[in-house]
Each structure stands twice: as C-alpha cells, then as structure tokens.
Image (cartoon, grey):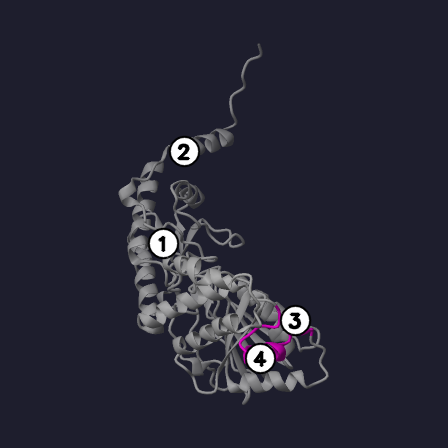
C-alpha cells in the first residue's frame, strides 16, 4: 500500500477547527430561551403565532377585497398611526414588494429633478442607485465609510433628501430630522426598515417614513408601508397627473388610492398583515414607541458594554452616538475567528449572528429588535465568552 501523505497545514487547521466545533457543547444554563438574533427575518413572538393559529387562520384563503381582510388592513393602519404619534394630515400607505420595491416606487412617484442620498452601507447605496433613474438628474451621493456616519448637506435644487435611519448592514444610526437651508418644498425620505417600531422619532421631521415589517415588527417581508406627510401625498398626486410613464405596480398614486380603501393593488400576504397587527397592538398596549425604544436601548447597551469591557471584542461603530440600538455589530481580534464562533453558536441553537455578507469583516451582527428580551442578549454574551474560552 502507498504511504499516506501528511495534510497541508491549512487543511489540517480547517479539520482541527471542525473537530473542535463539533465538540463544543454550550451548557444549558448559558443558552438563551430564544436563540434567534437575525436581522431579518427576525424572531416572531409565540403569542403572535398562537393568535395566528386561531384567529389569523380564519382569514387565510379568503378574499382581500372583502370586509374581514380589509378590516385587518385598517387595524394595521390605525395601529401604526397610534404607534407613530398620530401626526396630523399624515397617512399610512402600503403596497406590495417590500422596501426594495419602494425604492423604485419613490423614483417613479416622488422624485423629480435632483435628489441627495446619504449612504452608510449597502441599503442606502441601493436607494441611491434607484434615484439615478434616467428621467431624473444625477443625484448627489454622500458616501460614508462603513461603520461611520456623515450628514446630509443643504443643496440648492435638491427636491428629495434620502437616507437610512438605521443601516442594517453596518449598525449605523442616523437621526430623523429636517435639514436647515434645504429648498422650500424639498421632501425628506427616511428608510426605516430596521428602525421602525424600535427607535422613537418625531414624525413631523420627515415626509416619508417607509419600511417593511420583517424586523422590529416581527412579521414577514413582501409588503411596504409608508407614513406620508401631506406634502408627500400632494407631490405623488401631481407627478401621477403628469405625462411621466409609471408602471402600475410601481405607482404610488395607485398605492395611496388603494390604501384609503384598506387594501393593496395586488393580493397581499395575509399572514404578514396579521403578524404585523399583533406586534403593533402589543407595542401600543405596553407603552407605544417610547416603550419599544427603551427595550432596544437596554438590549443593545448590554452588547456594547460587554464588547468594550472584553479583551477580544470591540464595537465596530467607534462613535457611540452613531451606534444603532437595533443592529449591533461587534468586531473580534484577528486571532479569534468570528465565523467559527457563529458556527458553534448555530450548532447549539443560537442562530443568525453572522455578519452582513458583503461587509467582509471578522465580526458578529446581532439584532436587538423590540421582540428580543434583554435576558436573551445577556445569555448570548455568556455563550460567546464560553465559546471563545473553549476555542482557546
């Protein structure tokens, strides 16, 4: 028989890591009750699922043009208005397709002339690309280094200022506020997909606060929602009445008209609506957006404090004022492989702590959305400490 050749060092290292990972069993008393920490889709509370199994199931397979489902849509709209402090004249508009579709909806139905986009990561960049449509003037794009934050700048001739309140890919937060010196009539568009329902804000400080419900609202994707100001509603009507070509599916005017009838242009996901309604009612019953804000602050603060006191980890976002309270990104020292930690956690039922795939950093990313209990986050850091100690 031939002689066995020795393994190459890099393959031997990979094999040893796999063996170590398979041997690491996190003690049960360290594990969180709910081990889901993903940034979307996010954990869904058991109470939501229980309600869906009883009341929600009765709506499945029924017409979305009839009273039972339209009443569900109205429940969602009224619940969101209550949560967002009931700004006078604003409306909750909804449509099919999630936030990705809304970027194109906005470029067709709200943007005119030139826009300015603030980019701190992947999702801000995608909206900026939509605002570069051929029927618009090339936008001004302010690019920040991932993990840091820049600011919008007043610019003559800009009709839309667009930014992400919370950059899901990096964990950078931007305040919701209007910009002194902006042209009269300029609209402010806030991408709130991973912030809505988890960070308190002044609704009068923006014109379009849009999001999909698979983050703090503990639902599924596929629908978009927008809190729209009277000025935004007026512009949408004016552009729709112009000669601009707008595909029906991406028509904001169609979405507004249908939302006023408590429906969407096309068939919505009823389960998504029901889970959203349950989560919104839960937030409002417990103290509204201020209560939700306090929960996410407590959970994220624990992670940041843990990382700052750790010998092997540090918050990715260096400036505390720029750190998100709903998406926490933690860097690890070069001698510790965060990907291995994530794999060991996953093998023990603690899932979706991997970093954003395109960021390419040696880090973990943890959602601290409203449904996440502080006690589970505290257990998560105990698990990470244990895994690191076992990896040596």
Res 157 visible: no
The residue that mark 3 highlights is 249
Mark 4 vs mark 1, foreground winner is 4
Residue highlighted by disc 4: 256
Disc assigned to residue 203: none
Q: Earlier in the sequence, mark 2 or mark 1?
A: 2
The vertical placement of 78 against 330, above or below, is: below
Q: Is the residue under label 1 in contact with that under label 3 (CB below 8 Å)?
A: no
Report helix, strand or loop for mark 4: helix
Q: CA distance from mark 2 to mark 3?
A: 49 Å
Q: For mark 1, does the 10 Å Cα neighbourhood hold few (<14), some (14 to 19), or many (20 or more) residues?
A: many
Q: Helix, strand or loop at disc 2?
A: helix
**For marks 3 and 4 on the same chain, the one whose residue lies earlier in the sequence:** 3
Q: Residue 110, relative to residue 213: is it above or below?
A: below
Instruction: Please tell me which residue is depicted at 42% across the width and 43% down the height of the picture.
Output: 346
Which quadrant would the N terminus be assigned to in this image?
Answer: top right
* Nearest the eye: 148 or 88: 88
**Residue beneath the point at 42% across and 74% down:** 79
Q: Nearer the viewer, mark 2 or mark 1?
A: 2
Q: Earlier in the sequence, mark 2 or mark 3?
A: 2
Query: From mark 2 to mark 4, how far is it between C-alphas?
Result: 53 Å
Magenta range:
247-266
- Tags 2 and 1 in contact by the CB under 8 Å rule? no
Which label sits in the foreground, 3 or 1?
A: 3
Category of crowding for the residue at label 2, using alpha-carbon neighbours closer than 10 angstroms: few (below 14), some (14–19), many (at least 20): few
């Amino acid at each position: 028989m031939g002689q066995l050749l020795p393994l190459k060092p890099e393959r031997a290292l990979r094999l040893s890591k796999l063996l170590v990972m398979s041997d690491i069993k996190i003690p049960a008393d360290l594990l969180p009750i709910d081990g889901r920490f993903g940034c979307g889709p996010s954990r869904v509370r058991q109470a939501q699922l229980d309600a869906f199994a009883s009341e929600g199931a009765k709506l499945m397979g029924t017409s979305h043009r009839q009273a039972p489902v339209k009443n569900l849509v109205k429940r969602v709209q009224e619940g969101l208005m209550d949560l967002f402090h009931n700004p006078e004249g604003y409306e909750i508009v909804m449509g099919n397709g999630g936030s990705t579709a809304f970027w194109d909806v906005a470029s067709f139905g709200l943007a005119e002339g030139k826009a300015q986009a603030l980019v701190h990561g992947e999702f801000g960049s995608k909206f900026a690309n939509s605002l570069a449509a051929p029927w618009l003037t090339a936008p001004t794009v302010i690019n920040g280094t991932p993990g840091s934050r820049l600011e919008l700048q007043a610019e003559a001739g800009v009709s839309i200022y667009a930014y992400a309140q919370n950059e899901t890919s990096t964990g950078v937060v931007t305040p919701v506020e209007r910009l002194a010196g902006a042209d009269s009539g300029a609209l402010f568009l806030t991408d709130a997909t991973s912030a809505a329902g988890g960070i308190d804000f002044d609704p009068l400080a923006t014109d379009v606060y849009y999001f999909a419900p698979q983050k703090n609202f503990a639902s599924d994707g596929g629908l978009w929602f927008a809190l729209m100001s009277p000025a935004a509603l007026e512009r949408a009507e004016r552009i729709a009445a112009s000669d601009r070509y707008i595909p029906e599916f991406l028509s904001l005017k169609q979405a507004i008209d249908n939302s006023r009838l408590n429906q969407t242009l096309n068939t919505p996901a009823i389960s998504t609506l029901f889970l959203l309604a349950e989560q919104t009612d839960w937030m409002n019953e417990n103290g509204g957006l201020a209560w939700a804000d306090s929960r996410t602050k407590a959970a994220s603060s624990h992670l940041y404090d843990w990382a700052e006191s750790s010998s092997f980890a540090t918050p990715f976002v260096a400036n505390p004022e720029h750190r998100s309270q709903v998406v926490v990104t933690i860097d690890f020292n070069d001698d510790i492989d965060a990907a291995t930690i994530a794999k060991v956690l996953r093998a023990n039922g603690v899932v979706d702590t991997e970093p954003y795939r395109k960021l390419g950093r040696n880090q973990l990313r943890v959602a601290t959305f409203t449904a996440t209990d502080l006690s589970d986050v505290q257990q998560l850091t105990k698990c990470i400490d244990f895994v690191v100690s076992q990896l040596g």
